[in-house]
Image (tube, grey):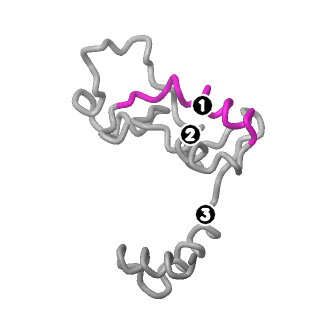
């Protein structure tokens, strides 16, 4: 039965009392910014204020970026190791219209380096 399966899973992962409720509260408190002009969800509230990274003049020998540029230089630009917004939309694609997912993918793909060990 579903309750028995849930109880078995909760024991296996050591789910504590109140833990799932805390996840729900955290999810309800999350802010997902949206830019009307671009029709995308920015990576964070200030992401679109950052300067674009000059990918056209960054030679392949300078990748991964973190090995060749100080993090404070990188983090001042619109450049990502992995596109968290696109990942979140993939995981919860029932919450986002296909055209919104496409606009976000099209925006983030060119500025994502894939330098993350999670990519």
SS label for mark 1: helix
Q: Label 1: which residue?
A: 105
User: To which quarter of the image does residue 69 belong?
Assistant: top left
Image height check: is 28 above or below 75? Answer: below
Q: Nearer the viewer, mark 2 or mark 3?
A: 2
Q: Is residue 85 left or right of residue 70?
A: right
Q: Position of residue 115 (x, y in %)?
A: 33, 32
Q: Secondary structure at mark 2?
A: helix
Residue at horizontal 72%, vertical 32%? Answer: 38
Residue linked to disc 3: 30
Residue drawn at 61 percent across, 45 percent down:
89
- Judging depth in this view, the residue of 11 and 118 nearest the camera is 11
Q: Quadrant of the C terminus?
A: top left
Residue 109 image point, x, y percent = 52, 27
Q: Which residue is mark 2?
A: 86
Report x, y in % for residue 54.
Answer: 44, 19
Give the quadrant of residue 112.
top left
Given contact means CB atoms under 8 Å apart, are the residues at marks 2 and 3 in contact?
A: no
Report, in whole angstroms, how far the alpha carbon at label 1 lies from the one at label 2: 6 Å
Say which label, 3 or 1, has the lower sequence index: 3
The magenta span reads: 97-114
Q: Based on the picture, tell me whether residue 32 belongs to the magenta stretch.
A: no
Of label 2 and label 3, which has the lower sequence position?
3
Mark on residue 65? none
**Neighbourhood count class around disc 2 (C-alpha, 10 Å): few under 14, some 14–19, many 20 upward:** many
| Contact, mark 1 vs mark 2 (Cβ under 8 Å) | yes
Mark 1 or 2 closer to N-term?
2
Extreme bottom residue here?
17
Distance between mark 3 and mark 1 Cα atoms: 21 Å
Q: Residue furthest left?
A: 67
């Amino acid at each position: 039965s579903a309750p028995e399966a849930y109880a078995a899973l909760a024991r296996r992962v050591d789910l504590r009392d109140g833990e799932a409720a805390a996840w729900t509260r955290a999810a309800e408190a999350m802010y997902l910014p949206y830019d009307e002009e671009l029709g995308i969800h920015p990576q964070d509230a200030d992401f679109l204020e950052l300067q674009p990274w000059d990918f056209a003049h960054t030679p392949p020998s300078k990748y991964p970026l973190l090995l060749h540029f100080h993090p404070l230089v990188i983090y001042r630009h619109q450049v990502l190791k992995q596109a968290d917004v696109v990942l979140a939309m993939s995981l919860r694609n029932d919450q986002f219209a296909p055209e919104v997912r496409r606009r976000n993918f099209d925006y983030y793909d060119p500025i994502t380096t894939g330098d993350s060990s999670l990519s």
